[in-house]
Image (cartoon, rainbow, N blue to C red):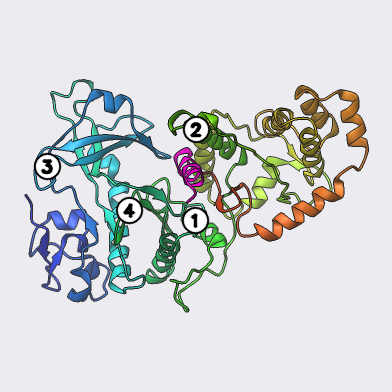
Amino acid sequence: MSSTTCKCASCKHDLSRSSYTTDEFSKGSGVARCKGCNHEYPVKPSIVEFDSGRYNISEKGVTSYFKLEKPFSQGSFRWVALATYLTGPRKGQTFVVKWFKTGFVYEAEEYNFDIKAVDKALEIVNKFNSHNIINRSIRINVPEVWVFTKTSGQWAGRYVLCEPFIQNYQKFNSNNGWTDVSSNWGQAMQALSHFSYHITGGQLVLCDLQGGIYRHEAILSDPVILSRKQEYGQPDFGTSGIRSFFSRHRCTAYCRQGWAWPTDVAQIYDPVPRTSKRNLDRAISLYQKTYPGGRSDTFAITWSPYYLEYNKAPHSVDKLELAETRLAHLTPKQRAALTLRMNRAGRAAGIDFMWGGKIGPDTRQAHRLVRLGSTKSDEIRDAIVEGLFDAYQAREQDISEREVLRAVAVRAGVDGAEVDAWLDSNIDADVVDEEAKKNKEVFRDSGVPTFVIQGVHRLDGVQDPMDLLEVLIKVREGQ
């Protein structure tokens, strides 16, 4: 078992493992330089001795082919399987094995960005805890790169990330600005994100905070770092990500007056409504299959209008031209990363996005068409909504055009003559406008999509099916 402390070559303090980067710690006592000395600011032993890391404290584990072939969970980029520690103080306890969805890894260096992000996150969490901002502790899982042995069959030689298992898993915020501040812990996590921006002089934001709640502490895993230099891997959206995150941030009771705040906030990374609806469908399906008596429960879904007003022109414009204007602040590399992320989100939901076509000056007629479907049945209404998404996102059609709207409604089962009469009239136009205006005021910090479940639980952005399932269960159990 390796030592968990190391003497810094510069300040001569015996400091915990979390006070060093992985590379520095490996150099050994008396040679390694702590993070404080490397960044040229003094580190007080009274602060850094508090180690917020949660480690494997083991050197070997075991899992089964079945668990690897049927992962119990997944994130945006990785699969997650369960395993059991075989050595050390955690012997017999459960841990998790994580690997990329994009393919197997045969070089440990492929996980460098993950390790680097956790190192930085741990440094920030240590400082946050030392300031006693929330009177409770936040810890963070510190993963290690392990490799399957030669006797592991087709998995032999593959590198994976391993870390202790977390119970009561939930998500608090994301790297696109979504946040859940309905609980004290949710408010604390948003304060941690704000604190990270302040304490680093506006250079980065610690976000995508998720993990488990225990009696007196929260344990986080898989954090994302948004940095000005975009140096923490694919989830790091750089300066644009920081601006977008703070466009939705609202200080909680734990944020301190005077903490730094970006001067150029702007919502840049918008979630995609259709992928959110697919994830909701999956969550409902999982609920009905796994929750006792779930098949007997019914779900009523209501669609509400919201005008995004992307196109300020009085006529339709090419979507790619509009993108040139809206994304002018992004570098070609950042644009490519954004497109890749959205394509992956789409494929995960069974959608192949197409980026051509035109976008109209408004979606008023489309929202009116949804109201027409609502007067028929939930099935027809949902078919119209799906048809509008398909026309805009997959067929590259302009859903402000009458013929496109008519075709969508007819395919959904509405009589063509009735569709013509509806589109020629002004029925419910004022109602749609008024409802859209109200939603703009109520959800001005959220945008679309926003889920409001049972009138209590509000979730913004593209939600993972498991997060939505957790909320459905809470509603069912009256929490």
Helix, strand or loop under label 2? helix
Q: Position of residue 231 (x, y in %)?
A: 38, 53
Q: Position of residue 105 (x, y in %)?
A: 28, 33
Q: For mark 2, what is the residue?
A: 294
Q: Position of residue 471 (x, y in %)?
A: 49, 45
Q: For mark 1, what is the residue?
A: 180
Amino acid type, label 3: Lys
Which of the two residues, 373 or 197, is positioned nearer the viewer here? 373
Which circle's residue, 4 or 3, is located before the other in the chain? Answer: 3
Helix, strand or loop under label 4? helix
Circle 2 residues within 10 Å: few <14, some 14–19, many ≥20: some
Compared with residue 368, is residue 224 higher up or lower down, i.e. above or below? Answer: below
> Is residue 348 visible in the rendered structure shown here?
no
In 3D space, how far apart are the residues under numbered discs 4 and 2 (Cα atoms)? 39 Å
> Is residue 407 visible in the rendered structure shown here?
yes
Q: For mark 3, what is the residue?
A: 91
Amino acid type, label 1: Asp
Circle 1 residues within 10 Å: few <14, some 14–19, many ≥20: some
Q: For mark 4, what is the residue?
A: 117
Q: Where on the picture, by quarter, is residue 386?
A: top right
The magenta region covers: 464-479
Q: Residue at x 85, y 23 (%)?
A: 415
Which circle's residue, 1 or 2, is located before the other in the chain? Answer: 1
Q: Is residue 140 left or right of residue 328?
A: left
Amino acid type, label 4: Ala
